[in-house]
Amino acid sequence: MKLRHAMVCSSNQNRSMEAHSLLKRHGFDVSSYGTGAHVKLPGPSLREPNVYDFGTPYKQMLDDLRRKDPELYRRNGILPMLKRNSTVKTAPQRWQDNASDGAFDVVFSFEEKVFDMVIEDLNNREHVLMKSVLAINLDVKDNHEEAAVGARLALDLCQELEAAESWEDAIDDIVAAFERQHRRKLLYNISFY
């Protein structure tokens, strides 16, 4: 069964976009979102992040950071990340503003506080369709190496969910097998649209 997936992460655009890119290359119907008020990218110091509004094109962010300090942003991986993101979609989108674009079957998050925000948002929506949605959290550290590992794990999990005749009936077994195989704990919840 073909499932529609959403990758949701915090506003930094690394983990969700890495997973979005990988799943898209494997033929999945996938969208990605952030949950913060703005897109925040590392700056010259922790107190000086680069802040952009959702909807700002990745190309514009890339050009801005190239003007500011191309060596710094190349060295810390932000320029390659933005270049990758621009090949996946035009601009970052905010979950709370755009997730009603369509009912997703599965929503992934990559940190627990984002998972909580997604669950809260889903629970506060009007449940008109009464269509189930599986929300899964796979904790992934926010660095480029771990984002790549997390994306591969999300792909494995998506493939298992796709292979199931009914993910609703098989979810407990799929999660238990995944946790045993990868030694990673998952949080999951079933909500409705």
Image (cartoon, helix red, strand yellow):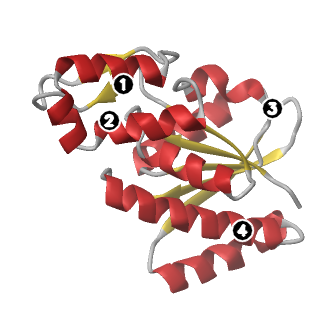
Amino acid type of the residue tagged 4 in the rendering: Gln
Q: Tell me the tag on residue 159.
A: 4
Q: Earlier in the sequence, mark 1 or mark 3?
A: 1
Q: Nearer the viewer, residue 32 or 90?
A: 90
32 vs 105, left or right, is: left
- The residue to which callout 2 is attached is 79
**Is residue 28 rendered to the left or right of residue 156?**
right
Mark 1 or 4: the one toward you: 1
Residue matched to label 1: 62
Q: Residue at x 28, y 44 (%)?
A: 77
How far separated are the C-alphas under marks 1 and 3? Answer: 39 Å
Q: Are marks 4 and 3 in contact (CB under 8 Å)?
A: no
* Image coords of residue 100 (percent x, y): 73, 26
Label 4, label 3: how far apart the Cα atoms are = 27 Å
Q: Earlier in the sequence, mark 4 or mark 3?
A: 3
145, 161: nearer the viewer: 145
**Residue 3 visible from this viewpoint:** yes
> Identity of the amino acid at label 3?
His
Camera-nearest label, 1 or 3: 1
Q: Secondary structure at mark 4?
A: helix
SS of the residue at dot 2? helix
Q: Is residue 36 left or right of residue 50?
A: right
Sequence-first disc among 2 and 1: 1
